[in-house]
Image: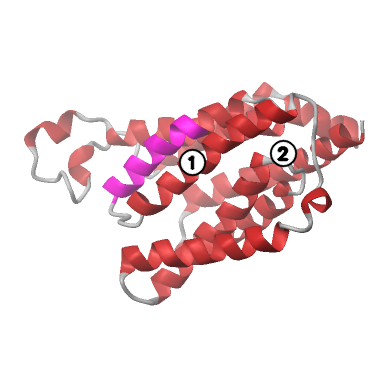
Amino acid sequence: MLKILKTLNESWIFDLLGVAIVIFTAYMSGYLFEDLTKTSYFSNIVWAKYVPFGMLSVISSSLSIMSTRLTARLNKFGNIIGTVNTLMSGAIDFTLGNSEAILTYPVSFLINAAAVKGWHEYGDKRVNRVTDFIKWLPLVIGGAILLSLGLNYLAFQNTSPLFWLASAVFSLSLIPNILNVFKIEDQWLFWIFYNLVQLAKAIAQGNFANIGKYLYYIVNSGVAYPIWRMARQK
């Protein structure tokens, strides 16, 4: 079984499958060839029709998949791609009307940049356990929740259901991202939970594009966890 997981983790065909899911769902939803005029901020600007916003979004989503896949392989370039793509995905999210993106994405960028440095310090092969840092784990979880609540309150200026949902989702993404700074294998368990929440949200919304994407991420996290665990034991 472990041999199959290792093969899947290293498979470039599985990488291409993830990118293909993004392109296919964007095409089927009619989003792939949309321009910038489809967004609220640029709907009345003449030059916006020449900006292929849909394709740029697909490129960003594809980079996110490649970042995750390379990270699963313990390849440091996954963090580098993820750090750069945070800027692009943040700009896209803000353009689509996500006002809190201007507050939350800079935090994600700093954490991803810290992961680049952290992985350099630990080297290519070392993997840690969450129990190695058990003393500060409650601080990480509590800090992530408080930071998420604070940033989203600044963005929403209220405590509406959307505020609580955005805060919960951002908290769930902050925790494994922080664990990734220290190359902790247990981050993948948090990513599985995060993607399950996002999958449930996509099913409730009838967003079939995101259903395929988050199913892919769940499989990837389920494959990466035992691979990282094996690497640590070695």
Please give the count of numbered marks on the rendered protein.
2
Residue 17 in view, yes or no = no
Q: CA distance from mark 2 to mark 1?
A: 16 Å
Which residue is rendered at x = 67% and y = 58% of the image? 193
Q: Which residues are magenta?
A: 83-96
Instruction: List x then y, in percent, for residue 18.
Output: 58, 34
Disc with the residue nearer the chain's start (2 vs 1):
1
- Secondary structure under tag 1 reads helix
Q: Which residue corresponds to mark 2?
A: 183
In the rendered image, residue 87 lying in the magenta stretch gets the answer yes
Left or right position of 41 against 19: left
Q: Is residue 155 above or below residue 216?
A: below
Q: What type is the residue that disc 2 sits on?
A: Lys
Mark number for residue 152?
A: none
Q: Which residue corresponds to mark 1?
A: 110
Residue in the foreground of this view, choosing between 36 and 106: 106
Q: Quadrant of residue 80?
A: top right
Instruction: List x then y, in percent, for residue 157.
Output: 31, 71
Which residue is rendered at x = 58% and y = 58% of the image? 172
Residue in the foreground of this view, choosing between 94 and 48: 94
Residue in the foreground of this view, choosing between 139 and 14: 139
Instruction: List x then y, in percent, for residue 116.
Output: 59, 30
Q: Tell me the quadrant of the picture where the C terminus can be found.
A: top right
- Secondary structure under tag 2 reads loop
